[in-house]
Image (cartoon, helix red, strand yellow):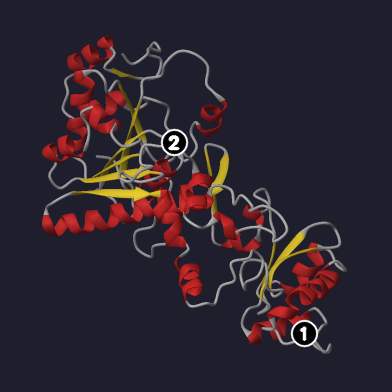
Amino acid sequence: MRSGSGPLAGTRVVEFAGLGPAPFAAMLLADLGADVVTVDRIPAGGTTDGLGAMTTGALGRGRRSIAVNTKDPAGRELVLDLVAGADALVEGFRPGVMERLGLGPEACLARRPSLVYGRMTGWGQTGPLASAAGHDINYIAAAGVLEHIGPADGPPAVPLNLIGDFGGGGMLLAVGLLAAMLEARSSGRGQVVDAAMVDGSALLMTMMFELTGRGLWDPSRQSNMNDGGAHFYGVYETADGRYVSVAAMEPKFYAVLLDLIGLSAEDLPDQWDAVAWPALRQRLADVFRTRTRQEWTDLLEGSDACFAPVLSMSEAPGHPHAVARDAFVSVDGVVQPSPAPRFSRTPAEVHRGAAGVGEHTTEVLTELGLAHGRIQELLSRGAVAHPGAPARMDP
């Protein structure tokens, strides 16, 4: 077993290659020190579509790859051998796919009773939409999230694919896997973790649902404290066409903001007078347009005005705070966020970049105890593959 120095060192995870949230969960586990072995499909001939080209290698850091034809009985048996030594499994297919391959929870738990079987889907394993196709925006729409994001005078804004795929998806699955693995250590029994992006997206809205139930949330967009309605919590354009953010919710921080931007002497309406928010927002907008983003940063950053410049992905890694905390790391020449959170004794780290499909096939099979001759036999029949092997379609 290969693993790093993080708190999950000594943990083995089998991941079935996919896109988006499931790989994100596996990346988190690998960052934390788990030995994650990705079961990739044997590459087929033909061209790669736009989605495949965009996502190849993304979120793939920290793992080893074995290329397996899971429709071949010998390939399927190899995967079960991998599972027999694993603590957890991660898959992100539609319900029923793994069962049809003979690799569903029943088969895998029979080989490893303490296995935590993690399933990542959009709609969940049950329900009328369980087998329907979808993506992040569909799940956050159905979960009651999307309707509340964006301007009041336009359609809802698309918040990248952060909420469904990653926050309500991959992160939720990782938490579920960790909880179930912890429980399995005491009980000796595994279980299935059904992580659905629609569930996780709704879960992220817990505070807003509760505020709604208490009559403290206006359903109209840009009408609430933290949806762009309040003037003290939002984004403002600067003189050079850039943007800054302020979040001076607490009265003491609001007072600091007004003082530093020169409005403390004005006779302004009460901070929490929602009727006055549009006019106050316009007043702040007028002020912020008088200086550049850098000038406002020089004045406000580090103060209790709750301020930060709005940075791009190309700018964020160079911010002094990010540099001081080593918040970004270069992996195979690509700058990306460092593992998080921070651990005082067992630091998380990126152990390797994204593996090529089948890069570690021979290595992993050798660890399973297969003799050289048997490995060559499996390669010859196409049950497994390694880099440089001829492309073939699964039967």
Amino acid at pointer 1: Asp
Q: Secondary structure at mark 2?
A: loop
What percent of the width, then of the height, locates residue 197? 42, 49
The quadrant of the picture occupied by the N terminus is top left
Residue 106 location, quadrant = top left
Relative to 136, residue 187 above or below: below
Q: Is the residue 13 above or below the residue 45 in the image?
A: below
Q: Is residue 56 visible?
A: yes
Residue picked out by circle 1: 259
User: Which element is circle 1 on?
Assistant: helix
- Left or right: where 276 falls relative to 140: right
Q: Position of residue 92 (x, y in %)?
A: 36, 38
Considering depth in this image, is 88 or 368 the residue closer to the camera?
88
The residue at the point 57 percent across, 27 percent down is 50
Q: Which amino acid lies under the numbered mark 2 shown in the image of this protein?
A: Ala
Quadrant position of residue 358? top left
Q: Which residue is mark 2?
A: 133
In percent of width and height, residue 162 lies at 53, 51
Q: Residue at x 69, y 59 (%)?
A: 151
